[in-house]
Image (cartoon, rainbow, N blue to C red):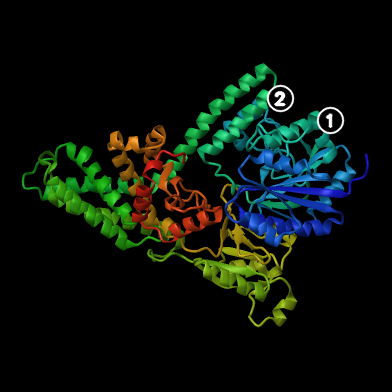
Amino acid sequence: MPPYSVKLSVVIVNYNVCYFLEQALLSVRRAVDKLGAPAEVFVVDNNSVDGSVAMVRARFPEVILIENKDNPGFSKANNQALRVATGQYVLLLNPDTVVEEDTFRACCDFMDQHPDAGGLGVKMLDGQGKFLPESKRGLPTPAVAFYKIFGLASLFPKSRTFGRYHLGYLDKDQTHEIEVLSGAFMLMRQAALAQVGLLDEDYFMYGEDIDLSYRLTQGGWKNYYFPGTRIIHYKGESTKRTSVNYVFVFYRAMVIFARKHFAPQRAGTFSLLINLAIWLRAGMAVGQRLLLQAAPVLLDAALIYGGMYFLKSYWEQNHKYVRTDYPPEFMLAAVPAYIVVWLTSAYFSGAYDQPTKTGRIVRGIFLGTVLISAVSNFLDAYRFSKALIILGGAWSIAALVGRRLALHFWRYRDLRLNERRQKNVAIVGSATESRRVRQLLETAAVQARIIGYVTPAAAEAETSIDEPLGEVRQLDDIIRIYALDELIFCGKDLSASQIIALMVELPQDPPVAYKILPEDSEYIIGSSSKDAPGDYYALDIALNLYRPQQARNKRLLDVLLSVLLLLGSPLVVWLQKDKTGFLRNCLRVLGGSRTWVGLRHAAPPRRSARAILSPADAVRADAALTEATRRRLELLYAKDYEPSTDLSILLHCLRELGRQG
């Protein structure tokens, strides 16, 4: 075989994570420089709408950019680049990663020294520097899958029987032969790929790395776990691992794998097991999400109910004109109805928004009390006691404020409930970069108290105008002395290797969050754990659409409009181009999976219901609007959002309410 002119081909598939992609490419650029051999870098963009393509063109002209006009999935996108890659080795790399400067050189050297190696994975760390167990994995046979699905793998991670999914019994600091590589960092020999084939495009997302790893071993190659270099993987950025969608996509991928590679009888057993797991995990995911969202409300409801029971008993014994007990309906029907009204009114007054404002709670409960008193006048059978309604309102205020005060004191050891506690932040970098971080945080309105900066070297402290807190070697003491909550590393002054080393070596008691400002970037990036999505501070405009008050108003408007449209459907449905779609959309909006008007072309800053109509749909123009114009109109809509805007757009697009959202 003739020698390769390119040593390494790096392939990154991107979808709407511009800020992470920028950091990944900066680290790749440094690693390529240190490789000492020719390399090529591909970015395959799956129709992102967050400016990723423009960023790559502007900042990374050396990158070979492939722009898709749709989202064909992870496997197909990777294969687009793999088919034209010319490197001796090819690396599939996630955009939410940071590689060390010597990662490519060390990995290629290992592959050179092990001609039997078809694939290689490395030690992966999360955004807090903690080891990610999926750095090394075993084949998900029916037994292994059973242990993982039903929690035995988590209970006994070091067991050679139960811990085979993540091979927890293997030392994470030693090189091992493994069965499955992670698609986040999957280095492969081009010759091995030529033999076993590329990624299976039947997998849209998840499972394709397991499938290809298995085919490599079936082809006579070995897969290795190599801890000689480390990468950061902001695991959780692309997907929410507790979401129902994740559960279905991930476990369905396991079914595809079983049907493809296992004998029919084993595949049938495996499929049955996986389908059972899908519904079990999906139910758990829904239950967990609902419980987390409802827990504060349920706790408040329980406190109010308990207080009302004691108030009722007290009033019966001490103040009621006729010393008789209230009928059972009072506690069984009336009080629960009062609680629903009080908490609903409190919710719409902002009682559950952060930071907590006592005035919002008082306003909400007061309005709820007035409403209960007014309605009770028309219900003779449930007109029990105006005094208990007023006392109940007072107790509700005390209960809601008291619970929040207790929780706030437990967390922060103070009673300043109306103040959002600012994080204590220190910057690790030069004085120049420190000033840039301060400007970014200030512009992004981040609630943080900048304690100071820590210099990478002693020379910086001598020449700097600003007085530093100390040097990097003193970070441990600086964290304790100043009670730091967060460290921001400046990528211009520290190498990825230095940053990763500090993440690993610094003690986590008390816990400190880490973020990175990449060189010449406007994003400060980090993640609190392996299961948390990556987050960032950026110079974003304030979007009125996503303020809690407006979000509630929008949801209430969606529900009211859907109810009115359903009531008027015998007439409205005949105006629709898609009559079945109209009824389906009404039900979807009621269920919360859709919103009547929202962002369809611009990426929302957070997860939200998919929009049926876009503000751009209401524009009447002679020529079709460009994609950039549509995004700009949507951002203006989000910036200046008012509920009346939705009504106007809905009236303009009345015949389009059945379109696919």
Is 643 situated above or below 575?
below
Mark 1–mark 2 CB contact (< 8 Å): no
Cα separation between marks 1 and 2: 16 Å
Q: Position of residue 124 (x, y in %)?
A: 70, 48
Q: Is residue 605 visible from the viewing direction of this image?
A: no
| Residue 210, horizontal then vertical, whole percent | 70, 34
Residue 288 can be seen in this image: yes
The amino acid beneath tag 1 is Gly
- Which quarter of the figure is the N terminus placed in? top right
Q: Nearer the viewer, residue 333 or 72?
A: 72
Seen at 83% across and 40% down, the residue is 190
Which type of secondary structure does the marked residue at label 1 adopt? Answer: loop
Q: Is residue 570 above or below residue 336?
A: above
Farthest residue to the front: give it: 622
Front-lying residue, 511 or 254:
254
Q: Nearer the viewer, residue 602 or 207?
A: 602
Residue drawn at (92%, 45%) of the image: 3
Residue labelled with disc 1: 220
Residue 261: numbered disc: 2
- Give the number of callouts: 2
* Residue furthest out toward the left: 322
From the viewer's side, name the closer residue of 115 and 501.
115
Compare marks 1 and 2 and give the one earlier in the sequence: 1
Does residue 525 appear left or right of residue 169 in this picture?
left
The secondary structure type at the circle numbered 2 is helix
Q: Residue furthest top?
A: 265
Q: In this rendering, is residue 490 above or below 119?
A: below
